Amino acid sequence: FIIENCKGKKVTWCSVIEQGGGPRSGQYDDIVHDGHSEMEIRKALMNRTLMDVGRRGKQMWLNFAGEGPSVLLHFGMTGSIKIHGETGVQYQSSKNETSEWPPRFCKLEIHFTGKKYLAFCDARRLGRIRLRQDIFKTPPISELARDALETELSPTELKAELSTTTMPIKAALLDQSRIVAGIGNYMVDDILFDAGIHPGSACNKLEDDKVELLAKSIRRISQQACEANAESSRFPSQWLFHHRWSMPPGTTKSLDDGRALRSEKIAGRTTVYDTKSQFVKKSVKKSPKKKKVVNIKKEKTKLPTKGTNTTPKSKDTKPKLAKSMKAPRKKGKAASKIVAIRKSARISQR
């Protein structure tokens, strides 16, 4: 769109003050301009010829001839490019546009030779206008993952990326620095619908066949969106995109083709999916294996009976005999003489 209308044309005038009659009209928006001064932006644009337009993920940049930085544009959720007198990209959120110029919420207006006027607009101030001398070696471009269309993602590479995290697959695909850059909320929902994957599925739990389908769906849905030039009326009729705008979180919708749609918050974002083709497989809990019980027969310890001596016997000590069991002492010769004398004395007395 920009290349068709502005490439090869020279900048003759620019305005960095907000225009269009919004609440900040007439002011300089230092948030959207990412802290750059008015003078810096004017100097980077004035009298320079637009040579090319580049993109990676959701970041776009304008390359100009001669020395000076490139102008990097990020659209956020509501940012857009408009060219005076030209029908722009028909976003779903901006159907009720007017032909007034400059347009509402215009943050930057550039006049090119040939009476071509370009405007960068952003209602919610989530977009950014940045100046970068080397866009590929500095953030945010240097921090992005591979582009969803520039480099084809193989199932093997995707599996390796997903196996390192337990986060929901929707959250992983929305992270512009993790797997691929360039796909937003509504595209992620249609990618996952195309692959038959529930948005809340844990990344490291996806089966190989689902990962292979996901790799193909990322590329296919991204190509279809770009071929339609992001015009919603040209999107495939089976896309969930056409139903999501009337489905706030917590609502359901039955379609004539048999699909049963549900809307809920997943990864902090409104998410629409088909409950019939996208579901999380319930893991079958295996019953724990019974441990083998080994019967160990314990010897019963005999309790000592009354009067039994429980003191352990020493090897060197002989057992003591009871008094009644003592052996009689042997009588000597002297003792036997005394006994004989006593007997004789008793006889004589009689």
Image: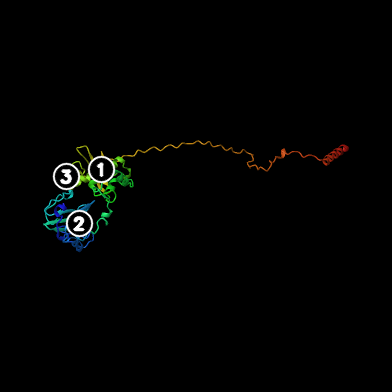
Query: SS of the residue at dot 3?
Result: helix
Query: SS of the residue at dot 1?
Result: helix
What residue sits 18% from the left and 53% below the top?
Answer: 80
Q: Is residue 95 left or right of residue 134?
A: left
Discs 1/2, front: 2
What residue sits 19% from the left and 54% below the top?
Answer: 53
Query: Disc 1 versus disc 3: distance between alpha carbons?
Result: 21 Å
- As rendered, which of 343 and 265 lies closer to the eye? 265
Residue marked by disc 3: 234
Residue marked by disc 2: 63
- Whether residue 5 appears in this view of the structure is yes
Q: Earlier in the sequence, mark 2 or mark 3?
A: 2
Which label belongs to residue 216?
A: 1
Discs 2/3, front: 2
Colour option used: rainbow
Query: Disc 2 versus disc 3: distance between alpha carbons?
Result: 30 Å
Q: Amino acid type of disc 2?
A: Asn
- Image x and y of residue 163, in percent: 33, 45
Q: Amino acid type of disc 3?
A: Arg
- Whether residue 263 appears in this view of the structure is no
Q: Amino acid type of disc 1?
A: Lys
Q: Residue furthest front?
A: 66
Residue density around tag 3, few if under 14, some if 14–19, many if 20 or more, within 10 Å: few
Q: Earlier in the sequence, mark 1 or mark 3?
A: 1
User: Cβ–Cβ below 8 Å for labels 1 and 3?
Assistant: no
